[in-house]
Image: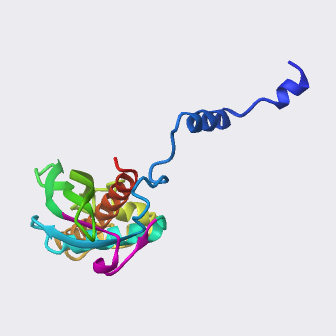
Amino acid sequence: MTKWAQSQRFPAWCLALVVASACGYHLAGTEVRLPADIQSVAVGKIDNASAEHGWEKVLSFALEREVALRGQLRWEPDPSRSDAVVSGRVRSVSVRPVAFNSRDQAVQYELSAVVDLTLSRRDNGEVLWRTEGLRVVGEYATSANVVVTSAAAFQLQPLDAANLRDPQWNPQSAADREAVNVQLAEGEKRQLLERLAQQLARDAYNAMIEDF
């Protein structure tokens, strides 16, 4: 092969991008396929049919934040002034045990949330996009002896020797082991609920603007 031919070779990743572009592929959430007159979006009423009181507000905030951060559409805080409104319903927020200790006590739970969302024109109520049964799942621990690698605390704060001396992470040094476990579990659950709301907002936004 000549030096000229060698200089004309593309790296494999460049060729893949060229082929993907030619075939019409693109990153999810980067192409807006909504009608051109839809420039602003507000978050309207989110009903909550689950037992997780107040989670609809967490989801509403996550949706508002996603629109504002992405910048492709303008977030309008007043639904009466927006071009389109997102509304919906939290169908369920459910928890089930997925791991047990030697005493048959649950030490790890799976938490799942299911929602229905609709994007409608503000002026005439025309439905522009709708999804039903959008679901996200995560796991959290109920015991400091259990490390869930997908849990919020594990991802946000690396553990070191100092952490292991902390009663939150080492129940052997805690005055009340059960109290520590309960506190840890509730904190993990709250953080997971926030992360699931953010994930739902991202998934919904990507599908909404590309009309999937």
Q: In this orientation, which residue lies closer to the viewer: 177 or 149?
A: 149
**Left or right relative to 198: residue 109:** left
**Numbered range of the magenta stretch:** 73-88
Residue 51 image point, x, y percent: 9, 67
Residue lying furthest right in this view?
3
**Left or right relative to 5: residue 156:** left
Which residue appears at 25% of the width and 54% of the height?
A: 130
Residue 52 image point, x, y percent: 14, 68
* Residue 163 falls within the magenta-colored stretch: no
Q: In this orientation, which residue lies closer to the viewer: 209 or 160?
A: 209
Which residue appears at 26% of the width and 53% of the height?
A: 136
Residue 86 image point, x, y percent: 27, 66
Which quadrant would residue 112 be assigned to in this image?
Answer: bottom left
- Quarter of the image with the N terminus in it: top right
Q: In this orientation, which residue lies closer to the viewer: 27 or 51?
A: 27
**Left or right relative to 69: residue 167:** left
Which residue appears at 15% of the width and 57% of the height?
A: 95
Which quadrant would residue 85 be assigned to in this image?
Answer: bottom left
* Residue 77 falls within the magenta-colored stretch: yes
Residue lying furthest top in this view?
1
The vertical placement of 87 against 115, above or below, is: below
